[in-house]
Amino acid sequence: MRIAVSKGRILQEALEIFARAGIVPEVDPERSRQLILPCRDSDLELVILRAADVPTYVALGAAELGVTGSDVLMESRIAGLYEPLDLNIARCRLVVAGPAGAAACLTRPRVRVATKYVRLAQEFFAARGQQAITVKLYGSMELAPLAGLADCIVDLVDTGKTLEANGLESYQTLAAISSRLIVNRGAWKLHHDQVMPVLARLRHAVEANQEHA
Ligand code: ATP
Ligand code: PRP
């Protein structure tokens, strides 16, 4: 079976949980440029992808299992997936943020929002009765209000250091974020005997990880 794993900060923490579950790639994915990584003593292999591509691989059956952020899952809302386990890693918050002291933009009828999470931002502002004019960006979101591109941003916050360093503050939290194990629905039914033991090992590993946190 194949497990699609987000590269970047999720990968580092996911590898620790995998190791506890006895899932150990033969080469170190953080050093190797190899994208398909067979695991020691098993028929499992890891494929290393961008976070946003993980649900696509799993939903279309190119990987049976996957690990990606709940932010990505909420935004993409791809069908054909089960989400049986919260790995409780890469934890952060999805927030509306903007220049310190300028939260009044949350009360205006129209607001310009820079974000990677266009769908979630649209839904958040629509529920408040505000019209959101969204600007889709792919990184360095905090720059947008400073450069006059937007009134506020919808983005991830962990330590809050990036906001603080740029004179911004969080106005409101939309969701708590962590990484999830996802399973292709077809694989869940057809390969139940292979999926379940891996899920059980990962569940125990997550519990052990939390005890040692
Ligand atoms: P890419 O590098 O592929 O463009 P990215 O910049 O979103 O994507 P990462 O920054 O590694 O890649 O983020 C991947 C996932 O890690 C996010 O979807 C989220 O679930 C989590 N994440 C992102 N930023 C943080 C953070 N500051 N603290 C904790 N988790 C985070
Ligand atoms: C993420 C996120 C914030 C930052 C928050 O960016 O988009 O910018 O981390 O973390 P903090 O609250 O601990 O400062 P990332 O580092 O992935 O860079 P990016 O702008 O390229 O997405």
Image (cartoon, grey):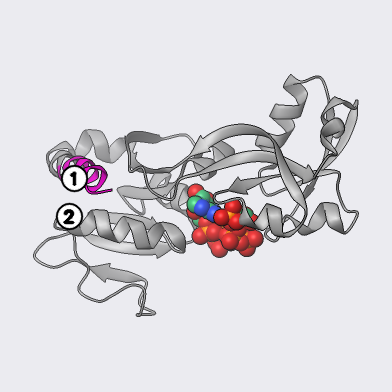
Question: Label 1 belongs to which residue?
Answer: 208
Residue assigned mark 2: 20
| Count of numbered circles on the image | 2
Above/below status of 134 relative to 40: above
Using the rendered view, name the quadrant where residue 46 is placed: bottom left
Residue found at x 33% / y 72% = 29
Residue 115 x/y as whole percent: 72, 47
Q: Is residue 16 within the magenta segment?
A: no
Question: Does any portion of residue 52 appear in the rendered image?
Answer: no
Label 1 neighbour load within 10 Å: few <14, some 14-19, many 20+? some
What amino acid is at disc 1? Ala
**Magenta part of the protein: which range?**
201-213
Q: Is residue 148 above or below residue 35?
A: above
Q: Residue at x 76, y 28 (%)?
A: 125
Which labelled disc corresponds to residue 166? none
- Secondary structure mostly taken by the magenta-highlighted segment of the chain: helix
Residue 95 image point, x, y percent: 65, 39
* Residue at image coords 75%, 58%: 166
* First along the sequence among labels 1 and 2: 2
192 and 98: which is toward the camera: 98
